[in-house]
Image (tube, helix red, strand yellow):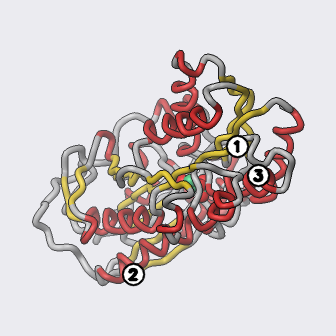
Amino acid sequence: MRKTTLRRGCAALATATSIALALTACGGTTKKDVANEGGSAAGAGKADPNAELKKGLTVGFLPKQVNNPYFTTADKGGEKALKELGSGYKEVGPSSATDTAGQVSYVNTLTQQQVDAMAVSAQDPGALCTALKQAMKNGIKVVTYDSDTTPGCRNAFVSQASAEDLGRTEVQLLAKQLDYKGEIAILSAAQTATNQNTWIDFMKDELKKPEYKNMKLVKVAYGNDDAQQSFQQTQGLLQEYPNLKGIISPTTVGIKAAAQYLSGSKYKGKVRLTGLGTPNDMRKYVKNGTVEAFELWDPAKLGELAARTAVALSSGQITGKEGETFTAGSMGEYTIGKDGVISLGKPTVFNAENIDRFDF
Ligand code: RAM
């Protein structure tokens, strides 16, 4: 693979200078930046569905946060698939879910190390764009997984499920438990997180339907995928809104911390909680009556699909264009959708009846 030297610019600046300067130079994300990032990075060259899968590649995983068990499981799924495919794996990433500048510099590190592909879960949709485009100019294939950037800044996005389905079903799950009545709040991750923000937009849209006329979203709080902050935010929500009846937390760190708080408080079983969590984190809260139902996909499968997509892109089997298909090993055949999105499938709803069948 031909690789050119890293060009000067914002991306290079982020590694070469202080984090503060890099942030100023590269900027955070505004809605306008995202809206202006049109086009797609897919379609460079032509896909050859019969191309042989290359071996000996290196794929770098860059999660939102390295010490988050969700990403540990996801990235292990990627590592296992790469081993099977005869390629190498590495993982780099920040330990905080709000270290956007750190993520930028990790993209630059992977570019300088000349990996063949990278799989990135974006903390912020716009902040990584310049660095990711630089990586692609250097011949590196870029897959986002879990949390996207914008279509022009990566070759493909491996999505956990339909964002619309996730947003709407979380409201539906909570509404049933509340009998469609009362004040509710959302406990999210980082304020810039692409995935959570997309789901929240669909939650708000779902709440506009007439069946929810007696439910009111009073606040969206941010726990930054930090256990302590999420716990404190839950406590704060209940102090600020004593009539709160339900919480949706679309983050594995948030829902676990909220469940921990509720289960040790007078609100246990009274204030309903749902969202996205892992069965292993949530088992005890389902069994002790704090949580009735919540959902998630299998993070290991998400990581595996991201790895297999990266290898298919690097091998020329796909370019990221809508309509292209490829076989992701034993996971079967996937078709690339609009804007280069590849969807893992439907999430699972976990409750007291089925939770013991899952171990992740
Ligand atoms: C957290 C992260 C991740 C999200 C899951 C549900 O671990 O925010 O991005 O997909 O929750």
Q: Is residue 287 above or below residue 224?
A: below
State which quarter of the image contains the N terminus.
bottom left
Front of the two marks 3 and 2: 3
Q: Is residue 32 above or below residue 124?
A: above
Mark 2, other Cα within 10 Å: few <14 / some 14–19 / many ≥20? some
| Residue assigned mark 2 | 88
Q: Whole-percent x and y of residue 327?
A: 21, 64
Quarter occupied by residue 218? top right
- Mark 2 or mark 1, which is nearer the start of the sequence? 2
**At label 3, which amino acid type do we have?**
Ser
Q: Secondary structure at mark 1?
A: strand
Q: Mark 1 and mark 2: span between their CA atoms?
A: 37 Å
| Residue assigned mark 1 | 187
Q: Is residue 55 above or below residue 275?
A: below
Q: Whole-percent x and y of residue 285?
A: 69, 59
**At label 1, which amino acid type do we have?**
Leu
Q: Quadrant of ligand 1?
A: bottom right
Q: Mark 3 and mark 2: span between their CA atoms?
A: 35 Å
- Mark 1 or mark 3, which is nearer the start of the sequence? 1
Mark 1, other Cα within 10 Å: few <14 / some 14–19 / many ≥20? many
**Nearer-the-camera pick, 228 or 197:** 228
